[in-house]
Amino acid sequence: MSPGKSYDVAIIGAGIAGASLAAEVSKEASVLLIEMESQPGYHTTGRSAAAFVDTYGPAPIRALTRASAAFYHNPPLGFTDHRLLSPRGVLMIARQDQMATLHQMQEDLSDTTDMQILTASEIESRMPLLRKGYAAGGFANSRVSDIDVHALHQGYLRMLRGNGGTILLNAPATALEHHQGQWHVTANNENFTASRIVNAAGAWADEIGAMAGASTIGLIPKRRTAMMIAAPAGLNPDKWPMIIDIDEEFYLKPDAGRLLISPADETPAPPGDAQPEELDIAICIDRIERAFDLSVRRIENKWAGLRSFVADKNPVCGFDDKAPDFFWLAGQGGYGIQSAPALARLAAALLLDRETPEDILSEGLRPADIAPGRPGLKQ
Ligand SMILES: Cc1cc2nc3c(=O)[nH]c(=O)nc-3n(C[C@H](O)[C@H](O)[C@H](O)COP(=O)(O)OP(=O)(O)OC[C@H]3O[C@@H](n4cnc5c(N)ncnc54)[C@H](O)[C@@H]3O)c2cc1C
């Protein structure tokens, strides 16, 4: 078989991780972005709750999210005609039996300047739908925003094309072999060569790693369910904040006049086209009806997606220690959209042997905490 067209970098997976890195790398290298679906956002990227919450996730994610804010507020010229972030605000709420968790979280996030501690009555006045007496305490973060995920994702794909990059759809990568200093990739029965391979395959990342003879990272995809319901008649939820239970038993987020609700489930599941389970839907409705003064009569739309984690819940970004020139960009869990702009810049610098961007380091991100070979990676 012919070795096919040659690229500096071939990236497997065109979700937000692969698309954002491909766009960054294409500024100075030739890039092939390989996606098995006909729609690049078909899997986790197209199924998120689209929230930008810089107090959410482990410390490296929070640092990457803070370092992404500038891109969201001021993307490059021509990136998109849409506003990428729209103010939302969040209330993290706790029942009386959850106050210990609330205090612990307040301590962990004490470096967050925008965090405002609230009493039960202050919470009720900010969220009229909450049942009286349900919340005993909580805090607000006004920097939380809604993300236009489609505009972000399409902006990166457009940037990639504008820089001469190639996107291959309907093309599952089925073989990866390294010989004579080059990676040989088979996708959709076509062959390509590349100097470096990036594994941005989301829930499938460990499968791609195994195909390349790389180390396993112990990735566990976890299913999360979400659904859309109508807001109570006569109420406009557009100005309401997102509400997150402090133990993440549920969340509720206004979305274009409706309410996105989730039981915040984390059920291990194999890589695939995740679908919502009836039990998770029932649990969601029960938790939402306990907390809020509403009764869920009809679900307008429901879906599930896979959030993929390694043991410490930090992302995995860097070269594999076994397979040569094989780069991981995986394990973004439930935070891969909000942190994508900074993680893509960091990954591009590591992949192309450039200096780590200073603004990302100054947010407290330590590359060793997200390196593939770190201790505590595996479950
Ligand atoms: C319900 C839910 C709510 C969420 N809410 C938020 C939120 O509010 N904020 C936030 O920041 N994040 C959120 N997330 C997490 C976020 O969506 C993910 O972290 C992010 O989308 C992961 O992007 P990805 O590119 O790694 O994965 P994916 O989007 O899954 O992309 C991986 C791609 O790799 C492709 N692929 C796999 N194998 C192959 C192969 N062999 N050949 C070619 N292509 C292949 C797949 O088809 C897929 O398109 C949420 C997730 C879920 C499920």
Image: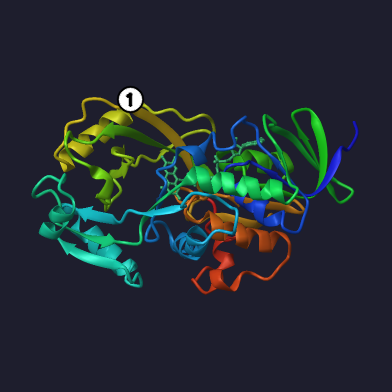
Could you tell me the amino acid type at mark 1?
Glu
Which residue is depicted at the point 17% across and 43% down? 291
Image coords of residue 241 (percent x, y): 27, 52
Check the image and report above or below for 63 versus 83: below
Left or right placement of residue 132 versus residue 250 in this view: left
**Front-most of 115 and 320?**
115
- Of the pair 126 and 279, the residue shown nearer to us: 126
| Left-right relation of 149 to 202 | left
Q: Is residue 217 visible?
A: no
Relative height, residue 12 to residue 100 (above, below): above
**Residue 226, above or below 53:** above
Please name the residue shown 20% across and 54% down the image: 94
Where's residue 68, x and y in %?
A: 50, 61
User: Total marks drawn?
Assistant: 1
Splitting the image into 4 quarters, where does residue 76 fall?
bottom right
Question: Is 366 situated left or right of 143 in this image?
Answer: right
Q: Please, which colouring scheme is shown?
A: rainbow
Residue that numbered label 1 is attached to: 278
Instruction: Specify the quadrant that holds the N terminus.
Output: top right
Say if 203 sits above or below 374 in the image: above
Q: Is residue 156 visible?
A: yes
Residue at 80% across / 31% down in the picture? 190
Provide the secondary structure element on which disc 1 rests.
Answer: helix
The answer to whether the beta carbon of the residue marked 1 is less than 8 Å from any atom of ligand 1 is no
Q: Give percent across and percent down for residue 282.
A: 26, 29
Which percent across, then down, holds residue 316? Answer: 58, 54
- Callout 1 environment at 10 Å: few (<14), some (14 to 19), or many (20+)? few
Please give the name of the residue rendered at 39% of the width and 53% of the height, measured from the top-left corner: 86
